[in-house]
Image (cartoon, rainbow, N blue to C red):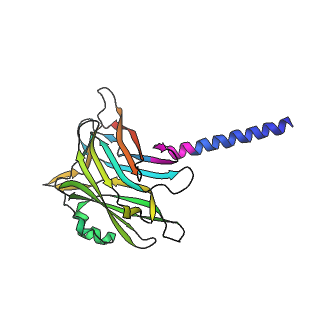
Amino acid sequence: MGDRRGKKRLVAVVLAAALVFALVAEMAGAELSERGDLFIRFKGGINPTALPREELAPIAIDVSGTIKTLSGEKPPPLRGIKIELNKGGVLDSRGLPKCHYNDLVATYPDEAMEHCGGALVGEGVYQANTAFPEQTTFPSQGRILAFNAVYGGQEAILAHIYGTEPVPITRILVFHIRRKSGTFGTVLSAQLSESVNHYGYVIRLALQLFRRYVFHGQQRSYMSAACAAPAGFSAASFPFARTSMTFEGGRRLSSTLTRSCQVRG
């Protein structure tokens, strides 16, 4: 009898360890934000992480958010997204063509690239669950193309979102860009209209910003940064981004992503 109980305890310990390992693996490089039944796994970072100490060098930035509920039920509709980037990262679009909102309306991705390819500054993906009245919910996913733009007289990124399930459809999400003082110097913010979530709900958004180009004979980069490690140190940790999502009803979840860089000799 004692031997049997010992084996049961061992199995329980192994299962618990496996569960912890699975959770750690899933959360590696991610930050979890939770409020009630709703939680978001935020992920992101820069590439490369080895950078000059003082001189700016080209980088790509990645940010994503995955939305879930503990109960598995439908989350509330997503209404707003905000990405605040560390002031050490510089977003500079000088010399890049600008895409116009009307150039993207009701276009397929190849048409969007034909109209605005010169203004491309990033790409991404989205996933959603779509439910039409009296029909079952089924997954939908698509591609995001991000274009440099001016919208409403303000510097912006136009996110061309295209998916084919359940029917081909294009949405355009406007990320307004503003500068501010403090730790996070560049703010990207977008509002999602009710039509975006009319027959479903977003469960994941991921965006990468990266573009190298030539302007006035000089190599330039849409995103640049240095590794500002203190003198005598070869690496530094820093708050890379503060991200947040706001849902219908006013619920807001946010997280600060802390990352590290190495000084490149």
Q: Does residue 35 show up magenta in the picture?
A: yes
Question: 194 or 114, which lies in front?
Answer: 194
Q: Quadrant of the C terminus?
A: top left
Q: Does residue 197 show up magenta in the picture?
A: no
Q: Position of residue 203 (x, y in %)?
A: 46, 57
- Total numbered circles: 0
Q: From this viewpoint, is residue 225 visible?
A: no
* Residue drawn at x 56%, y 44% as measured from the top left: 23
Q: From this viewpoint, is residue 38 visible?
A: yes
Q: Which residues are magenta?
A: 23-41
Question: 190 or 65, which lies in front?
Answer: 190
Q: Position of residue 251 (x, y in %)?
A: 42, 47
Residue lying farthest bottom? Answer: 167
* Residue drawn at x 39%, y 40% as measured from the top left: 256
Q: Quadrant of the N terminus?
A: top right
Question: 125 or 219, which lies in front?
Answer: 125
Q: Position of residue 244 (x, y in %)?
A: 38, 46
Residue lying farthest right? Answer: 1
Does residue 138 appear to the left or right of 175 in the view shown? right
Using the rendered view, name the quadrant where residue 122 is placed.
bottom left
Does residue 38 appear to the left or right of 244 in the view shown? right
Q: Position of residue 41 (x, y in %)?
A: 47, 47
Using the rendered view, name the quadrant where residue 21 is placed.
top right
Residue lying farthest front? Answer: 249
Work out whether 138 lies above or below 258. Answer: below
Work out whether 237 lies above or below 115. Answer: above
Question: 239 or 32, which lies in front?
Answer: 32
Does residue 97 appear to the left or right of 140 in the view shown? left
Residue lying farthest left? Answer: 216
